[in-house]
Amino acid sequence: MSSRAFLILLCTGVLLQCSGEQPVEDLSASGQRGEIAFKQVCLSCHKMSGGKDAPQLGSLIGRRAGSENFPYSDALRAADFTWSKNNLIDFLTDPRSFIPGNQMVFYGINDPEVVLDIVTYIEEYGGTN
Ligand code: HEC
């Protein structure tokens, strides 16, 4: 059984526990790898929708940085750009250089392929928030 089928089974009847993790149709191979990596490294803090520990990441691409209903750091609040695939790659590779003073406790990902997979997953997830 694929992990997605398993997730769908799990979600049946326990929808509340799965909120923020709706299954995505038609993920590319990179997006599928990214989904796994996202769950391993980002999901402890971020949800695609809702969550209190970090800004939600649904509909991230095309959204203004620091614009969600979240108590951002001054650094992120002052950030004056819109998230794109490219700047998200830069951010995840080295969060502290990209937005000095941000409060995301995360040192970045060394492997460019993993970064690209995660960004692809976030892009393909799309979604509304
Ligand atoms: C330890 C918890 C934690 C982890 C792990 C983490 N983040 Fe974050 N993230 C945060 C917090 C907290 C903020 C808000 C930072 C601030 O206000 O300075 C943030 C901010 C962000 C933002 C800016 C959001 C916005 O609304 O502008 C993005 C994008 C982001 N994180 C993506 C990711 C991705 C992708 C991963 C996994 C590779 C990840 N983060 C891992 C806690 C985390």
Image (cartoon, rainbow, N blue to C red):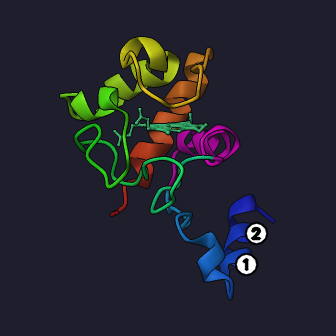
Instruction: Identify the image quadrant of residue 1.
Output: bottom right
- Measuring from the top left, give residue 43's x and y in whole percent: 62, 48
**Looking at the picture, does residue 114 appear above or below residue 71?**
above
Asked whether 61 falls inside the magenta stretch, the response is no
Q: Range of the magenta residues? A: 27-44
Q: Residues within 10 Å of mark 1 (few under 14, many from 20)?
A: few
The stretch drawn in magenta includes residue 32: yes
Using the numbered discs, state the Cα–Cα distance from disc 2 to disc 1 in whole angstroms. Answer: 5 Å
Up-down relation of residue 41 to residue 101 (above or below): below
Q: Are marks 2 and 1 in contact (CB under 8 Å)?
A: yes
Q: Residues within 10 Å of mark 2 (few under 14, many from 20)?
A: few
State the predominant SS element of the stretch in magenta.
helix
SS for tag 2? helix
Q: Position of residue 44 (x, y in %)?
A: 65, 47
Q: Identify which residue is drawn at 68% across, 88% down.
A: 13
Residue 103 vs residue 1, the one in the foreground: 103
Name the spot of residue 39 as percent of width and height, x first.
Answer: 66, 47
Amino acid, disc 1: Leu
Q: Which mark is residue 9?
A: 1
